[in-house]
Amino acid sequence: QVQLVESGGGLVQAGGSLRLSCAASGRSFGAYFMAWFRQAPGKEREFVAAITWSGGSTYYADSVKGRFTISRDKAKNALYLQMNSLKPEDTAIYYCAATQNYGGTLASRPYDYWGQGTQVTVSS
């Protein structure tokens, strides 16, 4: 059973930085795609960034490109999201997700496993 546990959220001022972590366990993730999604109050969940666990190729939503960096540490089975130049509109619950599905884009394909989420609040 795959388990994903996020941490690192908090309150930060606009322009500040946060680093989210996701501890992954339960199996080998060599064939997995890992991603971060977020959901703001009253809005639908949206794709933020994804990475291929094996090769480390990365993909970003246009809204975070150049400000956020997704990475993974294979030895620690950990996924990260470095968030810089944060804006109030980045305020949301951030979720870590994993999938082996190949259909569709990394933003749209079904993700099979989700963490419980971590709150990020950016004050203006």
Image (cartoon, grey):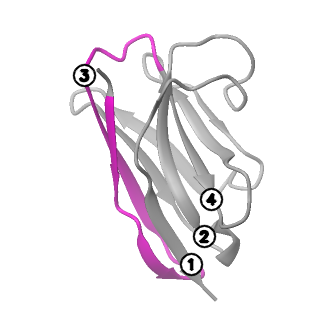
Picture mark count: 4
- Mark 2 crowdedness (10 Å alpha carbons): few <14, some 14-19, many ≥20: many
Q: Nearest to the eye among marks 4 and 2: give it.
A: 2
Real-space Cα separation, disc 1 to disc 3, in angstroms = 33 Å
The disc, 2 or 3, on the residue closer to the chain's N-terminal end is: 3
Residue type marked 4 = Arg
Residue 28 image position (x, y, % from top left): 29, 14
Q: Is residue 16 above or below residue 63?
A: below
- Which badge, 4 or 2, comes first in the chain's sequence? 4
The Cα–Cα distance between marks 1 and 2, rounded to whole angstroms, is: 5 Å
Between residues 48 and 67, which one lies in front from this camera angle?
48
Q: Position of residue 87 (x, y in %)?
A: 65, 74
The reply to whether the magenta stretch includes residue 15 is yes
The magenta stretch spans which residues? 3-32
Up-down: is 14 above or below 34?
below
Give residue 67's mark. 4
Q: Are marks 2 and 3 in contact (CB under 8 Å)?
A: no
The amino acid type found where label 2 is placed reads: Thr
Residue under pointer 2: 91
Quarter where residue 59 is shown:
top right
Q: Is residue 25 above or below residue 69?
A: above
Query: Which residue type does callout 3 highlight?
Result: Gly
Q: Which type of secondary structure does the marked residue at label 4 adopt?
A: loop
Quadrant of the snapshot with the C terminus: bottom right
Q: Earlier in the sequence, mark 1 or mark 3?
A: 3
Task: Name the foreground residue: 119 vs 35.
Answer: 119
Of badges 1 and 3, nearer the viewer stands 3
* Mark 1, residue position: 122
Three-letter residue code for mark 1: Val
- Residue denoted by label 3: 26
Which of the marked residues, 1 or 2, is nearer the chain's N terminus? 2
In the shown orientation, is residue 122 left or right of residue 17? right
